[in-house]
Amino acid sequence: MPKNNRLELSGIVTKTPIRRMSPSGISHCQFYLEHVSEQIEAGLPRQAWCTIPVIVSGQQELSYSIKKGSKVLVSGFISTHTKRDKTSQIVLHADQIKLLGE
């Protein structure tokens, strides 16, 4: 059975991205993406909203184009990260990013 794990989401970057370089020299950019849309569920319109942390690794040039307020379309896989307070959260590891127009 295939193990699918692919998510595509558009939205607005809500906080200034944090950029770091790993000890092995890989660039990482982390930001929060807020998505708001109207979806159809059971034949009726429904407001969909979420904020999800996104990590971009190894795409240094593109990640420097991302700013607070940028509209982006990201796709990648999701994984759970354990925070310092031992709680878990889902994170989108983006391997494709497209800056969207205003």
Image (cartoon, rainbow, N blue to C red):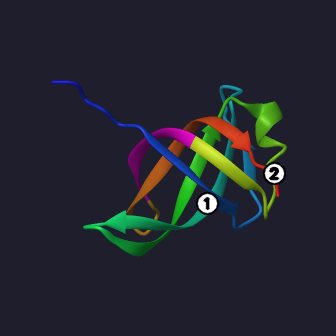
Q: CA distance from mark 1 to mark 2?
A: 16 Å
Which mark, residue 101?
2
Q: Classify mark 2: helix, strand or loop.
A: loop
- Dot 2 surroundings within 10 Å: few (below 14), some, or many (20 or more)? few
What segment carries the magenta color? 75-82
Q: Read off the residue under disc 1.
A: 33
Relative to 13, say whether 72 is above or below: above
Q: Is residue 87 visible?
A: no
Closer mark to the observer between disc 1 and disc 2: 2
Which mark, residue 10?
none
| Front residue (pair 62, 73) | 73
Q: Position of residue 22 (x, y in %)?
A: 67, 35
Q: Is residue 40 magenta?
A: no
Q: Main secondary structure of the magenta part?
A: strand
Marks 1 and 2 close (CB-CB < 8 Å): no
Residue in the image at 47% along x and 52% along y: 91
Mark 1 / mark 2, whichever is N-terminal? 1
Q: Position of residue 55 (x, y in %)?
A: 59, 46
- Dot 1 surroundings within 10 Å: few (below 14), some, or many (20 or more)? many
Instruction: Single out the residue that lies furthest toward the left.
Output: 1
Relative to 100, say whether 26 is above or below: above
Q: Is residue 44 visible?
A: yes
Residue in the image at 68% along x and 29% along y: 58
Q: Classify mark 1: helix, strand or loop.
A: strand
Residue in the image at 69% along x and 50% along y: 72
| Front residue (pair 101, 7) | 101
Q: Position of residue 56 (x, y in %)?
A: 63, 40
Q: Amino acid at mark 1?
A: Leu
